[in-house]
Amino acid sequence: MIRASTTAQASIVVLNTCTVTSGADQDARAAIRRVRRQNPNARIVVTGCYAQRAPQEVAALPGVDLVIGNSHKHQLAQIALAARREEWSVGPFVPLDALTLPYQSPIVDNERPTANGQRPVFVSDIFAHTELLAAPVFDAANERTRPNLKIQDGCDNRCSFCVIPYVRGQSRSLEMQRIIREVNTLVDAGYREVVISGINLGRWGRDLLQPPSQAGEAVSQRPTTNDQRLVSLIRAILAETTLEKLRISSVEPMDWSDDLISLVASSPRIAKHAHVPMQSGSDAELRRMHRKYRPWHYREKIEKIRAAMPDVAIGADVMVGFPGETDAEFEATLRMVEDLPFTYLHVFTYSPRPGTPAAEMKNQVPVHVARERNRILRELAAEKKLTFMRSFIGKTVEAITLNVVGRDAEGDFTEALTDNYLKLHLRGANQPNRWVKASITDVVSGTLAGDPSDALTVFEPRSLTPAAAAR
């Protein structure tokens, strides 16, 4: 099977969906309609969280040929390539026809209900999964330089607004030596930066069994303590691989231990980037959200991170319009955002998710109020980001070149990403997958502009293997 260069050329199109908000569901439906218009003959396979949460709803959408939930995502290729209905029985799982709806719309060429008029659906109990099966994920824009390695999935928290635990299951970790092997494989293929990620990354390792002792004692059935935590994993990656740069994705505030902060600050091989979900600056609101920290805890973590790393990029998720959010509670969030040294924010307007406690709460915030609060925070975040970016004018930064070359009024530029997670237009057509130092000259349209300093190249160019470059 060859990867198509465009949707219109594909015989099978796989849509990996999100369901964290109602807007995400709408985006998924719009994507299905768009693919159907662009390529009426393609088989459309829908997977991911929306498929796991509402398989009947997804299966009933015009154009959808196959629904594969997160429970079966690791078998997606095998299922999607099956030619006949009788082949759609994979491993210990079988299609749950009871979860599909009879097809209602008129049949056209690319709409293929099964013989009994139902869409094939592969969804099972996500909580039955105790093992994480993962492979590197390559973002389309940056796939030749920054693979994303998922090392943890699921979540044992129960935030009152969040549907993710119900579509991702319990927290599951990839074993340390498997991660080391994956990272070494990526390094051998030529990659210079790897992003480790997870739904609740800071909980990595806590579900793994303790290894047997040197005396040959039996493996403990109790959760691990110090031997299998995120800090020990990062140390192992640094010690057992030659990876040039490790980037850590979102980590909850309670998991930013002093050891983790110190390790990130002290190692030049770890990107200076901390994404720390906040959600609210109001104590009462955090309690209603069932978040496991208080505003003063959060403030302390952010201040420690900034003190240890003056140039670190600090990002946060913030929610507005949570049920019962008063003007005073929103002002508490606004004041915290103003006070703390954020580089960027992901601002979300609360969206009721079926089956979550928050969806049943009283005092739902009017949509127009929530949208106005969203606007206020986004404008404040934009100001803070611009101030942070301008602080680098006249300075030299490290950045990795991506695989996109553009052109503006001043000539060619190469897209790059700095160590501290800022977009950079590097003057000239530069080779991708190089860590370079760049002199920052300006900030244009929310992007750093700079000139390369070839004499200050951090690492010699490394070519990707043909297989990696073709991904």
Image (cartoon, rainbow, N blue to C red):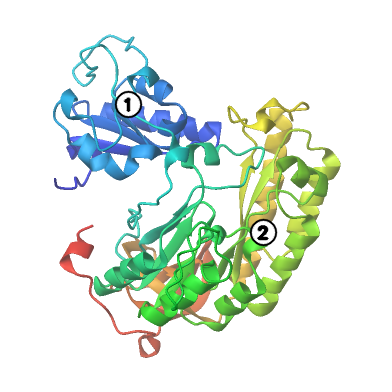
Please give the label number shown on residue 269. none
Would you name the residue on which mark 2 appears? 383
Would you name the residue on which mark 1 appears? 121
Q: Is the C terminus in the top left, top right, bottom left or bottom right quadrant?
A: bottom left
Q: Position of residue 223 (x, y in %)?
A: 55, 59
Which callout, 2 or 1, points at the residue further toward the start of the chain?
1
At numbered mark 1, what does the secondary structure look like: helix, strand or loop? Answer: strand
Do the numbered discs 2 and 1 sit on residues whose CB atoms are within 8 Å?
no
Q: Is the N terminus in the top left, top right, bottom left or bottom right quadrant?
A: top left
Q: Position of residue 87 (x, y in %)?
A: 17, 29
The amino acid marked with disc number 1 is Val
Residue 145 placement, left or right of 202: left
At numbered mark 2, what does the secondary structure look like: helix, strand or loop? Answer: helix
Q: Position of residue 97 (x, y in %)?
A: 33, 20
Could you tell me which residue is drawn at 73 percent across and 60 percent down?
A: 298
The amino acid marked with disc number 2 is Glu
Residue 397 placement, left or right of 314: left
* Residue 419 in view, yes or no: no
Residue at the extreme bottom: 455
Could you tell me which residue is drawn at 34 percent across and 62 percent down?
A: 407
**How many neighbours does mark 1 have within 10 angstroms: few (below 14), some (14-19), or many (20 or more)?**
many
Could you tell me which residue is drawn at 46 percent across and 70 percent down?
A: 217
